[in-house]
Image (cartoon, helix red, strand yellow):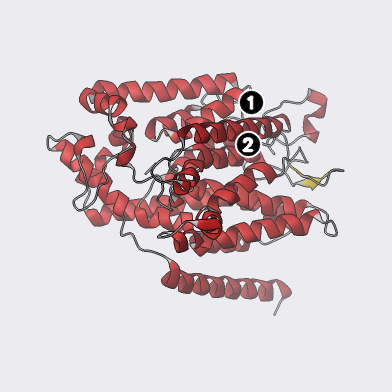
Amino acid sequence: MAQGARRTIAQVVAVVVLAVAVAAFLREEAVRHEFFDLKVYQGALTWWVHGGEIYDFLKPGSPYGFTYPPFAALVMLPMVWLPWHVATTVSLVATVVVSTVVIWWLVDPIARRCGWTRWFALAVALCLAAAYEPMRETVSFGQVNMLLLFVVAVDLLWLLPAGSRWAGAGVGLATATKLTPGIFIVYLLVTGRWRAAFTAMGAAVGATLLAGALFPNASREFWTSALWNTDRVGELAFVSNQSLRGVLARLDPAHPGTVAWLVLVLATLAGWVWRSRAASAAGDETTGLALTGVAMCLVSPVTWVHHLVWLLPALILLVDNGMAAPARSRRRPILLAAATIGYAFLISRIVWRFDEDFGGVTGFLGSNTYVWISLGLLLGLPVRRPAAPAGGPPAQRGSSRVETGGVAQLPQPHRVAPAGQRHRIGALGAVR
């Protein structure tokens, strides 16, 4: 048998074994939420279509209702006329498809550089992603997190580097759908992409005004009342809230400390702006996306565990940087160990061990584990510089390399070189 055939068979066997192991792990560890949030969406929209106020709806037997802006209701409206099994199938298939695409964009450059079989690298990554708690929670709840990440990634990794006139539109629509992606508009502003920033603001405002014209009562209710009612999204001290606000709320559930939270938010945003500007200056759009997703999770008042799918790009980039570092350098094992440890905690459900008791030093450290990981990623994720061109999504086109500082490098995504040098530069290097 040829060596190539033996390698393929070995890889197929390895993927099957890993898939079986992940399935066994999920059978024991995964919590099945039976598309709870999707039931909230469909129930609220059905109530609305039949004459009720969408923000008055609460899912029977729960305190949860529709919390998204009216534009999200417009986008989701066709769900009213879908049978339940069709709605769940659409949610599942859409999440799997966009997750596969995003992971492919992030993993394929690593496979190319390291000489790995590309389908094998993707298959392994998808198996590992299936075990990742925020991903499995997103699927089980029927959440929209990966759909929004996909829309933002298309904008930042494809349209923006290509100089498209539509760059920013995806960020704007994501913001109109769920307010927290609005931090990506700030990212475009602080990194000096003015046209894309104003396109994003225009898209967000346009979508919001469209919803307001079609549904004036719902819009008035959301912007004047429902948006400010934090009780609608759940208790701030709930251990699933892995944001800075959640950390303070668990220290003193009765008095979460708003001033202290604002100070922490400002400090976090300052660090994020500094690091994001460095990534933009280096042409490292993918790291800019990753850092902004991490910052969003930290500063949002409520970041449920399933919102932490926004950490996926940063975790994968840790692996990317580790594999790009010299084989005998200290940098490689440190970065790969950081990625492994972070991933291990994020599949472990460790925070839920402190659901009933998050007091004391152990409770404080354990119940906020995912926040510590987010902070570590925000502060420690390397920024890369351009390398030679290759295939892949524009923002990761090319193989990473390591320069004198030992930092993995990627090509510049949005800069145009002088005509005589262009051959040397690559085209491009969630509240429930």
> Mark number for residue 338?
none
Q: Residue at x 63, y 22 (%)?
A: 192
With respect to residue 37, does 7 lie above or below? below
Q: Nearer the viewer, residue 366 or 5?
A: 366
How many numbered marks are there? 2
Residue 140 in the image, given as x and y percentages of width and height: 37, 57
Q: In 3D space, how far apart are the residues under numbered discs 2 and 1 (Cα atoms)? A: 9 Å
Q: Residue at x 61, y 45 (%)?
A: 375
Mark 1, Cα crowd under 10 Å, few <14 / some 14-19 / many 20+, is some
With respect to residue 167, does 332 lie above or below? below
Residue 281 in the image, given as x and y percentages of width and height: 72, 29
**Secondary element type, mark 1:** loop
Task: State the image quarter where residue 236 is shown.
Answer: top left
Location of the N terminus (image quadrant): bottom right
Earlier sequence position, callout 2 versus callout 1: 1
Q: To which residue does mark 1 refer?
A: 191
Residue 118 visible from this viewpoint: no
Task: State the image quarter where residue 46 is shown.
Answer: top left
Q: Residue at x 69, y 45 (%)?
A: 380
> Mark number for residue 288?
2
Q: Amino acid at mark 2?
A: Gly
Residue 203 is left or right of residue 163, and the answer is left
